[in-house]
Amino acid sequence: MDDDLGALPPKEDFSGWYNELLWRAEIMDVRYPVKGLYVWYPFGFALRRNVYGELRALLDVDHAETLFPLLIPETELAKEGEHIKGFEDEVYWVTHGGLSPLEVKLALRPTSECAIYPMYHLWVRSHADLPLRVYQIVNTFRYETKHTRPLIRLREITSFKEAHTVHATWEDAEAQVHAALALYRQFYATLCVPVIVSKRPDWDKFPGADYTIAVDTIMPDGRTLQIGTVHHLGDHFSKTFAITYEDVDGEQQFAQQTCYGISERCIAALISMHGDEKGLVLPPAVAPVQVVIVPITIGKRKEEVLVAARVIEEELAAAGLRVKVDRRDLRPGAKYYYWEMRGVPLRLEVGPRDLDAGQVTAVTRLGDKSTVPRASLRFGVADLLARFTGTLTRRGEEHLLSHARVVDTMEELSVAIEKGVAIVPWCGERTCADFIEETVNASVLGTEVQAGFSCAGGSACISCGKPGTGALVGRSY
Amino acid sequence: MDDDLGALPPKEDFSGWYNELLWRAEIMDVRYPVKGLYVWYPFGFALRRNVYGELRALLDVDHAETLFPLLIPETELAKEGEHIKGFEDEVYWVTHGGLSPLEVKLALRPTSECAIYPMYHLWVRSHADLPLRVYQIVNTFRYETKHTRPLIRLREITSFKEAHTVHATWEDAEAQVHAALALYRQFYATLCVPVIVSKRPDWDKFPGADYTIAVDTIMPDGRTLQIGTVHHLGDHFSKTFAITYEDVDGEQQFAQQTCYGISERCIAALISMHGDEKGLVLPPAVAPVQVVIVPITIGKRKEEVLVAARVIEEELAAAGLRVKVDRRDLRPGAKYYYWEMRGVPLRLEVGPRDLDAGQVTAVTRLGDKSTVPRASLRFGVADLLARFTGTLTRRGEEHLLSHARVVDTMEELSVAIEKGVAIVPWCGERTCADFIEETVNASVLGTEVQAGFSCAGGSACISCGKPGTGALVGRSY
């Protein structure tokens, strides 16, 4: 799998590029014999470990990690009316244990409200138990009938991080919604992935929520990818599952809840945002290998070069970096190709001439070449990695800016939507949204848009002309 | 849940003690509304994280972590004849996606050979790809009809670590079996859990294996708990799934395989081995809280004591310890009770008298009290924790020794088996094993016994008198 197969398809052919990158960089193997189920290669899993390690570190500040069962009895899943309606078409059902039919069918969790909240009913008793903030990272299942795609649309979501919180008041829960959004922003900043935050239209909110705020990014082809959602659940579920607490006055009150999730789409986003025709481009924070050292051992002085490479490896590893010397018996060019495909942020080349000059040659994954004095290598490498992170962040922001337009008319929207997303004034009526969606073949994704740039435009709904506010319109995955 | 409810049931009533400890120490909640499925409390999950962190660290030296799908099509599961026969009575079947019946039924993995080996068929091509060593930590499922018990006998095993390796020769695979056993010994040494290793009788080996070597421990009531297995698979599965490689001479050869697993029974073992009537007793290596600081703030000088406690916390945290100051508005005695239930290895008491004397009072979870000079606290604490680990290891070994007997006659076996396990000479014949098992109502668990003490006894089979070798006999969970 490390044969030199030349460049990837051009990134303009996004599907072709993405699919070929996933196997050539050894992220996912798509050959598992069931549609919509994929296998993590070890390299892909190492990336997943680092990405979810960052997410855990952010959550662990004030959430507790836990683990609830996969199987939800039909009787529990059906309790919240809107919720079951939202999921019943796409739930996998376990009907048999061995050769015996089960008395109660068991659903593979599509999400865990109905597994967790019967326990919250038991766990929450007093205002002193609140707020309660719990999360788990688990596999969840959807019987997708649409076209499936690794990391993006799956039947087994292998890496769903879902948090479920309980609060005393609706306002406390709303504050948690904003805290969760801040946490998600911080997470995506670590991945150098720019995001657009917006409040989903009422008809597109989570089944059983008061409202849903979504985090989207823009893929290379201009389509949006939803990479996180935060739901204010109000007391819908607490009334269904009898989650009550005794307030300071000794009265029983229904609790207020939120939930919020991120799946392995976060990895699809970071791969798609940064990668190029040579392969992955990984942010140092999550790259399985941050620095690869390639010894240039052509000619004599081979031993000397290999020793120097090993000393550098030890020095950088001691500084906490994920570093590797590539000692394989391959041409340097083949090694460059191999590690570029796997997105390693920084390559150090160490040859006889570098040794004589007391320096190391450094090449970033984006091709910036420099020399670093050997004596201060550790600091030089840290500096190059920090600047590389900065470059990825800036490129991401530029990508977002160049694929988003604030427009005032349907004509402008029709043009803008071919390139990416648009923000247009909309009155908030469903009929106008339907008209916009049909006219430009795209979706009204949300309002109260926060995109890191000014979203201020006109205020006359582009459908009916009545007063409106900015709505995000785009074609989504 | 932190109310003072007094002591646990006596440990002699093992089931009562175990069940009450699991909820009072907040390890597992057993009230989930499906039999055999349990919920990890946050504290229990923190313990799980540390335990599996240790296991990962050992495996990561020369294994790669990865992740395969949960759902296995019936067509794959049925390929290896012995294997499917071993599991068909206890597999959960998914038969419907949404409202539609599936064309091919999908099994929830009972173990992942049939999910992984179709991919190994694609991954393994040349001798240069070998050895291949991969592991995953996943949920697996068994439709248990026997009595279920948290962490021990479950329908959803939430934390199955399974490794799957591929080798060129049968001998290479056998060497891996021994490497895996060495790794498991090291893992259980970290948990201070003593083990007995033995080769399971042929009729009790893994379905589809050449042979199985098992790791057992002895529970407080003398019954054995299987806490790890290592299987030499030979070429059974490689022939079924066509896992072949090109050898150095360019010939295609069937690969040789092993697999080995550990489940959350490792946590059941460490809880049961060390706990007492005050609650958990946790080895420092995996304790979620290693040191708890209780400020003794009775009387004046409260602020001074709280500051001193915070400085100690920072100092110990900087030294890499998991440390916590209990600042709650509770009596010291209530705090002692709370943290003893949760197994914290070391409690530090800091009061005005300690401040004046330039010392800290230290009490281990087993009640050993000492004073540590404040100036060298960090080293004093490290020393106490190391000695605590040593004490748990020694106690574990004593438990094993006092529950195992080497005996030569059926009469002696009948007596010994009431207290624990026995090692008896056995000729290797099934009929003799059946006779032994029926006579003493126990199982012949294995031969080639390694238990950390001399297993040498007589050599005349206690059933037929023909030449035999030592076999482990016990009643198992």
Image (cartoon, coloured by chain):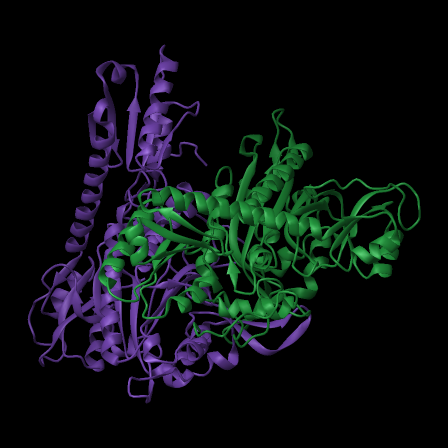
Chain colours: A purple, B green
Q: Residue at x 63, y 58 (%)?
A: B75
Q: Residue at x 57, y 47 (%)?
A: B393
**Residue B169 falls in which quadrant of the image?**
top right
Residue B214, given in percent of the width and then of the height, sits at: 68, 48
In this view, the residue in front, A212 or A113, is A113
Q: How many marks?
A: 0
**Residue B130 falls in which quadrant of the image?**
top right
- Position above or below: A235 against A47: below
Residue sitting farthest toward the left: A458
Image quadrant occupied by the C terminus of chain A: bottom left
Residue B315, given in percent of the width and then of the height, sits at: 30, 47
Residue B240, given in percent of the width and then of the height, sits at: 67, 47
Residue sitting farthest toward the right: B465
In this view, the residue in front, B262 or A29, is B262
Kindly tell me whether residue A207 is visible in this rendering: yes
Residue sitting farthest toward the bottom: A251
Kindly tell me whether residue A155 is visible in this rendering: no
Q: Residue B189 vs residue A395: left or right? A: right
- Position above or below: B217 against A196: above
- Position above or below: B174 against B333: above
In this view, the residue in front, A392 or A435, is A392
In this view, the residue in front, A362 or A178, is A178
Q: Residue A303 vs residue A388: left or right? A: right
Residue A126, given in percent of the width and then of the height, sits at: 35, 80
